[in-house]
Image: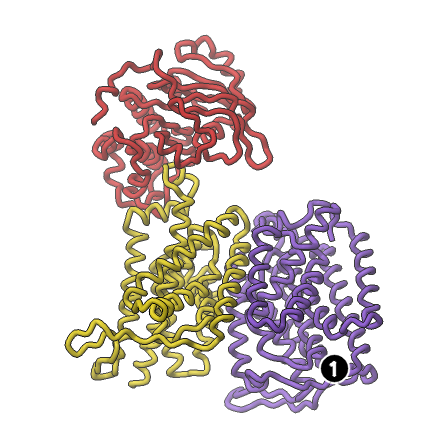
Chain colours: A purple, B red, C yellow
Amino acid sequence: MSALTDDTLPASPRAVRDEMIVFVVMAALLAIVPATGIYPFFVMQALCFALLACAFNLLIGFGGLLSFGHAMFLGTAGYVTAHLLKVGQISFPYWAGHWVVIPLPPLSPELGIIGGVLVSALLALVTGYVSIRRQGIYFSMITLALSQLLYFIYLQAPFTHGEDGIQGIPQGMLFGFIDLSKPTILYYVVLAVFLAGFLLIFRTINSPFGEVLKSIRENEPRAISLGYKTDQYKLLAYIASGTLAGLAGSLKVFVAQNASLTDVHWTMSGEIVLMTLVGGLGTIFGPIVGAFIIIAMQQYLAGFGQWVTVIQGVIFVGCVLAFRRGIVGEVANRVGHSL
Amino acid sequence: MPETKTATRPAAGAGGAQVLSVKDLQAWYGESHILHGINFHVKEGEVVTLLGRNGAGKTTTLKSVMGIIGKRSGSVQFNGKEISRASSDSIARLGVAFCPEERGIFASLDVRENLLLPPIVSSGGLSLDQIFELFPNLKDRLNSQGTKLSGGEQQMLAIARILRTGARFLMLDEPTEGLAPVIIQQIGHTIARLKKEGFTILLVEQNFRFASTVADRYYVVEHGKVIDGFANSELEANMDKLHTYLGV
Amino acid sequence: MQALYAQLLVGLINGSFYALLSLGLAVIFGMLNIINFAHGALYMMGAFCAYFLLNLAGIGYWWALIIAPIAVGVFGMILERTMLQWLAGLDHLYGLLLTFGIALIVQGLFQNYFGSSGLPYAIPDYPQIGDWRGLQGGINLGFMFLPIYRGWVVIFSLVVCLATWFLIEKTRLGAYLRAATENPTLVRAFGINVPRMITLTYGLGVGLAALAGVLSAPINQVRPLMGADLIIVVFAVVVIGGMGSIMGSIITGFALGVIEGLTKYFYPEASNTVVFVLMVLVLLVKPTGLTGRAA
């Protein structure tokens, strides 16, 4: 599976310093958004998806693994966080013939997020253990099937409220004193979490772990012959990616104030792939650009029914046939730097 | 066989027409430039051998003639027709048959299917009976999986299947590689027999002792160029040079 | 017991569709190295094709059974010629992404014009011979009531599957196909037009999907998204069975349909998920799939 990113990645060495400059500029631009009059809800939503796409990109762009089921982390973390914030009490059906009930009150935002992230980490461990067993195209099919399995479970599980979803979720006071129901405060919290998540991914890519991942992507047999247990590396990358995708899902609960089946559906997994493809597979900033473009497109075309789906399909086809580097990859190729 | 008349034409085609004429053939694998201008020709009824070290470009020459190498330039004429830009399937249908070095026996096909796979491109090919006469071993193994055969049998199958097609120009890439002496001998007999029946053969060989038993002429390939050529009768005189070229 | 047999029959019918679709996926994957995500959308197009033939041209079921697979097959061959063939030499994943995009376009267009609800397609009531009214009605088998159309779908699918198996495993054309799956370059150097074969193979695989679509139209109605969820189950079937063997695809398809039917009877809550759960189990026990080679 080495050819995937061969022509998508610029050949030049990573210029960490230049990338940091772009990062600071990006952070500064995002920080002044509330002062510009741009609808903050749109930017917050886009930031959640940007984090999600970055997490997905960690796996495909640097591990060579195309997950077609990343919506399962978004949706799972969303449901868990939403449930903890709104209800709290956890009931396991029929454990040895009885309902097991953990009586909890509705939890605070930070605990809700921790819960969502922990459960998605656990989910990533389990699904990763299964899906890492096959490579390439099979890996994609397996992740898709696993997310569909979860979709059907959530469709039937009582706590998700099926087709209705969990609605009207209280945003609450973060750490007891940050009022998340105030849009501007929520915006900066979302931005801070996004930037922290992004830096974590950035750090991972440039760590020795990231280097091993890249070498596995380029040539797995060679990495094995060098003594790396490539399956363990791939599993770790999968867990990291799934956990961060879960963080995005928990965060999104505070923005959208609901958790629904849409977030677990395969169409959502496809959108995550599309965002990353448009921005540039294997680029650092591409997923962010892609997420903003796709979310903006959905906003503007919301009234056009299924034409959104058709346009997304056209973008997929166009990107694969003529624009495999994506926007950021194309720019990076022009300026001769990795971005 | 229907072509017995042509089959008895004089061998060693001294005055025969040029079947294959290659001029300034260049070829690339991706970015790496492998052939830097190959020139040679093969006349009707001849057995011509390309000699040279590993990596000199002999196999690439055959593949370029066959149209398998995507990036190539220069001129290749087959029976006077320019084929350097043609696709490999259309080249094959003109009557060029290729037996690759790795033999290319298909694992998902049994021996019979392997044998019958290449389509007939013109009349005048060997019948199955004639093929079994040349390679009696194959007849008993018709229902075996192709890759279950021994190396020698696989080589025979690889040659046998291109004899059926009616192609009169055969390109054999290292047919003796890795085989036992007795089987090499059998393949030598086969080539001699084919020559007698009027086939034109372009052979790639490392083993020039074997080549000397069948070839009319030789070309020496080095670094993607033909650097020398001589007839079989001049072999003795060129022995010293040859040892230097081949490093044996 | 009646209910059990009824669910078994439903299982066999779903199994027929799994078999027809996974067979096509396997054949296409062998030649094109592409997992055809558009397979579900093309299955849907097969059903719509039958619907259009009936409602726009008055052409009935039996002709649709022939015309729809050919029409959708030709559409598939155009897709292959204009788009898929440019992916040769690239990573397999691009094929998945491209065909996913095609699926979105096709399904989106149909949704725009036909919404998401189902359009009815009647079971054919001809030829009428004696008491028989085409494929309508049913037979009392003593232990169960067998709707004739359902029995027809199972038997006809089985025949088509076996015919495809015969074509690929026992004929000269099939030998070309198997050989080209292994080593397309050499097969081409023998004088066979491999690019044309690839196009025809894609047409064949897609035609099988369209045929399944026509068969399913009277049972499941004609809906723009009828193939969208189905294709994911078929992916799981393919992971379970592996794509190395034609017969393996057929058997796995039918077997999983039956297991799903049994689950619907014994534990209906799990009937949507049982195939996926089985996939997980198979991956844990035998990661290469039941009949598959390492991939």
Depth check: A182 or B66 in front? A182
Query: Going 64% across and 58% down the picture, which residue do you hit?
Result: A278
The quarter of the rendered structure image containing the N terminus of chain C is bottom left
- Residue type pointed to by label 1: Pro
Q: Tell me the chain of label 1.
A: A
Can the viewer see residue A133? no
Examine the image and state in which quarter residue A114 appears.
bottom right
Q: Position of residue C40 (x, y in %)?
A: 45, 65
Q: Position of residue A95 (x, y in %)?
A: 53, 86
Query: Going 21% across and 84% down the picture, which residue do you hit?
Result: C142
Q: Position of residue C41 (x, y in %)?
A: 46, 65
Tally of numbered tags: 1
Residue bearing the label numbered 1: A109
Q: Residues within 10 Å of mark 1 (few under 14, many from 20)?
A: many
Query: Going 55% across and 54% down the picture, which residue do you hit?
Result: C94
* In-image side of C254 versus C230 (left or right): left
Depth check: A193 or B73 in front? B73
Looking at the image, which residue sits at the far front?
Answer: C57
Disc 1 element: helix
Depth check: B21 or C245 in front? B21
Can the viewer see residue A297? yes
User: Image height check: is C247 above or below B159?
Assistant: below
Looking at the image, which residue sits at the far top?
Answer: B237
Query: Going 55% across and 32% down the picture, which residue do you hit?
Result: B28
Examine the image and state in which quarter residue C140 appears.
bottom left
Q: Position of residue B194 (x, y in %)?
A: 29, 24
Depth check: B130 or B74 in front? B74
